[in-house]
Image (tube, rainbow, N blue to C red):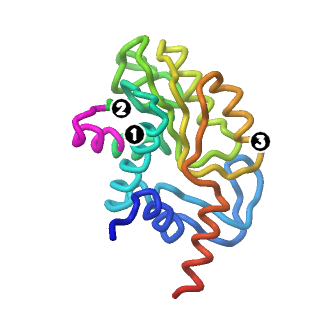
Amino acid sequence: MAVNPRDELLAVLAEKSFRLGQFKLSSGGTSDYYIDCRLTTLDARGALLTGQSVLQEIEARSWRPNAIGGLTLGADPIVVATSVISAQQEGPIHGFLVRKAEKTHGTGQRIEGFREKGAHVVIVDDVCTTGASTIQAIEAAREFGFEVAGVLCLVERQEAGGRANVEKSAAPAPFVALFTANDVRAEHVKSLTTK
């Protein structure tokens, strides 16, 4: 029986990316768990599942973007994986990355990769807590001249007002999360009891 890539991605996130303990977050808060999606998105199998799952969500929502991108570093592996899978399926979605600040040398651009003004794009991020990095990417994309068709994160932490912040910034484009932190935690706990 074939496993849905999204279901398998959740299992990989729970195994590789989720940790219980006491952690200080980039938002300044503390938490009894930590999710490092890069341990999944930079894993060979995890990258494949990420690209497949993100592409499925984009297609299910009929966003039809020309490109996918987000703020470096969390978005980088998601962008590349999704772009590669899309090309293999004969419906290429190009990639772009948003620098945290404009380069002070060379062409001085903030958007790297795909750069076609007026293009429809999807903004991606790995984890959304306050939404600050996602919002920074949305603003940079619009400032460049992209039309934001949708915003997607792998895991929404469901705290610090992140969803409301991103939804406000993304509007009228929708914001979706493939998983909530509760989804990943439940899968992690379940895997511990089945071992």
In the displayed structure, does residue 170 sit left or right of residue 44? right
Neighbour tally class for label 1: few under 14, some 14-19, many 20 plus, Cα within 10 Å: many
Residue at image point 32% right, 60% down? 44
Q: Residues within 10 Å of mark 3 (few under 14, many from 20)?
A: few
Residue behind mark 3: 161
Q: Is there CB contact under 8 Å for labels 2 and 1?
A: yes
The disc, 1 or 3, on the residue closer to the chain's N-terminal end is: 1
Residue type, numbered disc 3 = Gly
Q: Residue at x 71, y 27 (%)?
A: 168
Residue that badge 2 annotates: 95
Compared across the picture, whether 173 is left or right of 161 comes to left
Real-space Cα separation, disc 2 to disc 1, in angstroms = 6 Å
Q: Quadrant of the N terminus?
A: bottom left
Q: Which mark is residue 79?
A: 1
Percent position of residue 30, x then y: 76, 58
For residue 117, which quarter of the picture? top left
Q: Residue at x 41, y 52 (%)?
A: 50
Image x and y of residue 176, in percent: 59, 40
Say which element carries label 3. Answer: loop
Q: Which residues are magenta?
A: 82-92
Helix, strand or loop at label 2? It is strand
The residue at the point 38 percent across, 65 percent down is 3
Expressed as whole percent of the image width and height from the top left, the position of residue 10 reads: 50, 62
Any magenta on residue 57? no
Mark 2 → mark 3, Cα distance in angstroms:
28 Å
Above or below — where is 100 with respect to 120?
below
Magenta portion: prevailing SS class = helix
Instruction: Give the CA separation, mark 1 to mark 3.
Output: 25 Å
